[in-house]
Amino acid sequence: MATYKKRGAKKSVNSPKISEQEIESTTAEVFETLDASASKTEEFVAKYQNIILAFIGVITVGVLGYLAYDTYVATPQKADAVTELNQAQYYFNLAINEDDSQALYLRAINGGEGKYGFLDIIENYGNTPAAALANYSTGMAYINIQEYEKAIDYLSNFSSDDVLLSSLAKGALGDAYAQLGQDEKALSNYIAAFNASSNDFTTPKYLFKAGIISASLNKNSEALEYFKRIQSDYSNSPEAQQIEIQIGRLENQ
């Protein structure tokens, strides 16, 4: 299951009981929203690629099944944690669709009006699926407000047995390092991201980013390897539509 490094204890808030069906529904909505938010992070790494890639808004059955099952058999504490997560996620959802979104992301992170934020959930609910997801959400929120070092802190402390979620977390780490100009670390995380899972969703996305960063580091042979893998193995992906241009540019240098 997903894990994170606990950061201490904080305030306590009584949460209403929720049904198993509501927990599963909340979990699915959280993942769909987080995945949609990743499309915004593409704008932050545009300088490392020729066009902004469209982030596919699909979460696989395996990812949903992981948290849905875990919360289905959860203790009351786990159910309460998901209830608290729902409010923090509400602010996160609002932030995604707002031009002036920083205050909403900070509310999602820190809480307000007597409600928990992601940090409170991390600190008060131990090794629950909701706390693990809150750790990931915190990192994504910090990326969206361009606080990349904080994003790295939380995303680095997150791990999951689910290969797709691991891939997304590593890819987000790569984006944060790229924004800080730490291209070698960005590259290593993009490589980890596409190695974490072989699928049509994340693999070509992070192969492409690895190729762009490799080319910027004058690692042209590695960049060609990543681009040609997209061309051969993921020819129907959005990244493949521009891959011949990238390959031709490198081969003619």
Image (cartoon, rainbow, N blue to C red):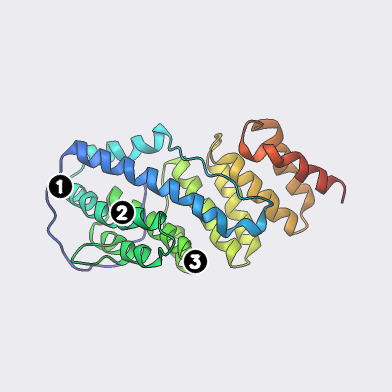
Residue 186 x, y percent position in the rendering: 60, 58
Kindly identify which numbered label has been placed on residue 89. Answer: 2
Residue type beneath disc 1 = Pro
Nearest-to-viewer mark from 1 and 3: 3
Residue type beneath disc 2 = Gln
Q: Secondary structure at mark 2?
A: helix
Q: Secondary structure at mark 3?
A: loop
Displayed quadrant of residue 226 = top right
Residue type beneath disc 3 = Gln
Comes first in the chain, label 1 or label 3: 1
Mark 3 — residue? 146
Mark 1 — residue? 76
From the image, which quarter does the N terminus lie in? top left
Residue 200 x, y percent position in the rendering: 56, 34
Mark 2 vs mark 3, CA separation in Å: 19 Å
Apparent side of residue 230 relative to residue 17 in the rendered image (left or right)? right
Q: Are marks 2 and 3 in contact (CB under 8 Å)?
A: no
Apparent side of residue 111 relative to residue 206 in the rendered image (left or right)? left
Mark 1 vs mark 3, CA separation in Å: 36 Å
Mark 2 vs mark 1, CA separation in Å: 20 Å
